[in-house]
Image (cartoon, grey):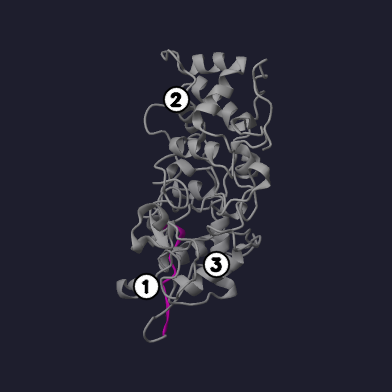
Amino acid sequence: MPSKTARALVLLALVTPALPSCTPDARAPAPRARAKIVHSQTGEVLESAAPSASEVLAAARKNFSPLPERMDRGPRPSDAVIALGRTLYYDPRLSKNHDVSCNTCHPLDEYGADGLRVSVGHRAQEGDRNAPTVYNAALQFKQFWDGREPDVEAQSKGPIINPVEMAMADHGVAVSVLKTIPGYAELFAAAFPEAADPITIDNVAAAIGAFERGLTTPGPFDAFLKGDEEALSPEALRGLQLFMDVQCVTCHTGPGVGGTQFQKLGSVKAYKVEDPGRFKISGDEKDRGAFKVPILRNIAKTGPYFHDGSLKTLPEVVNTMAEYQTVKGTVSDAERSDLIAFLNSLTGEIDEEYIRKPTLPENGPKTPAPDPS
């Protein structure tokens, strides 16, 4: 491993994603992980010792942890609450024109991201930021790119009344629509049996949040962190070592491999950003151009990348992050391949049964018609 001095000379806030690695030759012995780091002052190429898988695992456990089964803050919600949240997540009648649901911009069968630069909402209007994945999102310390909401429950309320997204006039209108749908009376009563008036916007948010807190996707990286030293390919193992050696973990850490802080892109080279980012919320000039560091879980499946969806591929992102965030300035083809192999190991498994689309309750005689205006 590099000395503490050498490690301190490098920084990588890798706000990026991943791509599938090449299939390793099963007949060849696993290459020993090596990381090359360029000294920021002398330009000398520093090579680390070649750690074993067990050494990489020990270091990884200091920076990461496996995904939990669920992301609840307290006791597990009842099955009735989760089932209601699943139904509401898929229901487009929470939108003015009955054509946009949570699943529209965060399709659960596509790793919770719609693949667009920016999402399209009411009347085909485009948003101004890329829609991040909803999988594992409850792990993050804040929600939205600018961190304007504290949790997934609060986040779920925002799109309903955003004129570009679901476009309801206010939350009261959304609740009044739900009350015209006979089947929801039973679902809300089962989910919130002690409430005199269970159909409220807070209960809508609580139910959607309860469902989203079960959207975890454990994968090979979790198996590795739990002790399976063969869960990562030789390429991914080298990539993980490099990821730690150049201090990507300064920003990308924890079970989500990110989502724990705000940062600006361009720590070693200026990166032009038009969006004010966190500044729009805080009004603090130091927050101008700062965004929540995204989680890297399932990053290979959730492009395009960055807050504005400006980069389409993982190699582009890795190259950009190396240029603007590290003293290395560039990565070799081999290093890029290894980094992407590691990032690809963050792709997890979707619980198909948990996300199965429910049968939505039918409209009642007073349910309003879609409003395209």
Mark closest to the chain's N terminus, 3 or 2: 2
> Is disc 2 in contact with disc 1, using a CB cutoff of under 8 Å?
no
**In the image as oriented, which residue stretches furthest toward the front?**
373
Query: Disc 2 to disc 1, how far (Cα)?
Result: 46 Å
Residue nearer the viewer, 117 or 348:
117
Above or below, 161 against 287 in this view is: above
Residue nearer the viewer, 128 or 32:
128
Which range of residues does the magenta coloring cover?
A: 44-54
Query: Disc 3 to disc 2, how far (Cα)?
Result: 39 Å
The x and y percentages for residue 183 are 61, 16
Q: Tally the marks.
A: 3
The x and y percentages for residue 230 are 53, 53
**Which residue lies under the disc numbered 3?**
318
Q: Of the numbered discs in the image, which one, if any, rests on residue 77?
A: 2
- Was residue 45 drawn as part of the magenta stretch in this picture? yes
Answer with left or right where residue 140 lies relative to residue 95.
left
**Which residue lies under the disc numbered 1?**
2
Residue 194 seen anywhere in this rendered image of the structure = yes
Residue nearer the viewer, 272 or 115:
272
The x and y percentages for residue 41 are 36, 84
Mark closest to the chain's N terminus, 2 or 1: 1
Residue kind at label 1, given as amino acid type:
Pro
Residue kind at label 3, given as amino acid type:
Val
Of discs 1 and 3, which sits in the foreground?
3
Answer with left or right where residue 344 lies relative to residue 98.
left
